[in-house]
Image (tube, rainbow, N blue to C red):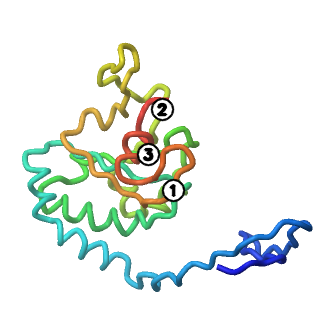
Amino acid sequence: IRPLKQFRIRAQRGEIEFDLPTGIEGLQVVPRALPPPIAEIESEVDAEVKGTLGQLQNKLAGAQRVGICVTDITRKCHEAEILKVLTRVLQRMKLGPDKVSIVVAQGLHRNMTDEEKAARYGASITSVYKVFDHDAFQGVVSLGTIAGSFSIQINKVLAKCDAVISTGVVELHQYAGYSGGTKTVGIGCAGA
């Protein structure tokens, strides 16, 4: 941490330089260096899934329908590599394309085009698996109410599944605390 009068920050399109007004002093906090990026993402995902394979098999034992919630284009996630590994594992568990539905957890964001889906999830996935856009207004069913009248609504495709797998990244979210994990389903595939 160091006091500064002149700042230079990285922005989406280069750097921005600015001076602080007279009488205002700022501090710049310089974070530690990030670890190097993962070189082979699919191999890393494969190793992680293998590490939890026993748990995954136990959770999916007896499942006839499985839903996979994936993030939309507003998140930076290596969905294609994740889906390659997950679908390969599910197929070995006799859960092929006829028993697996992929739902785009877009919350209130716009639908993705078919081209965007093929680029994000991989054409080898989108040409074989059903990929559904979540509709927070008409594509949900109620799981009941809480506090007297607040309806808990979830995507109607997921409601028919015996098990749901969520992908995504954990990052700060302006309304929900953090993205990823439960939020992918509980907000990304919930009613408006």
Residue 98: x and y in percent read 23, 47
Q: Is residue 61 shown left or right of residue 106?
A: left
Q: CA distance from mark 2 to mark 3?
A: 10 Å
Which residue matches tag 2? 136
Left or right? Give the position of 176 relative to 153: right
The Cα atoms of the two marked residues, 1 and 2, are separated by 22 Å
Q: Nearer the viewer, mark 1 or mark 3?
A: 1
At 31% from the left edge and 66% from the top edge, which residue is drawn?
Answer: 84
Kindly identify the amino acid type of the residue bearing the numbered disc 1.
Leu
**Earlier along the polypeptide chain: callout 2 or callout 3?**
3
Residue 63: give x, y in percent of width and height: 13, 44
Residue at 19%, 64% (x, y): give it.
89
Tell me if residue 100 comes above or below residue 33 in the rendering.
above
Q: Nearer the viewer, residue 8 or 107?
A: 8
Q: Nearer the viewer, mark 1 or mark 2?
A: 1
Q: Is residue 7 above or below residue 91?
A: below
> Label 1, label 3: how many angstroms apart (C-alpha)?
17 Å
> For the point 13% across and 51% down, which residue is it?
59
As helix, strand or loop, the secondary structure at mark 3 comes to: strand
Q: Is residue 26 left or right of residue 91?
A: right
Residue at image mark 3: 105
Q: Pointers 1 and 2 in contact (CB under 8 A)?
A: no
Q: Amino acid at mark 2?
A: Ala
Q: Quadrant of residue 50?
A: bottom left
Q: Please tell me which of labels 1 and 3 falls first in the chain.
A: 3
Of residues 97 and 28, the one drawn nearer to the viewer in this rendering: 28
Q: Which residue is mark 1?
A: 172
Residue located farthest toward the front when viewing the structure as drawn? 23
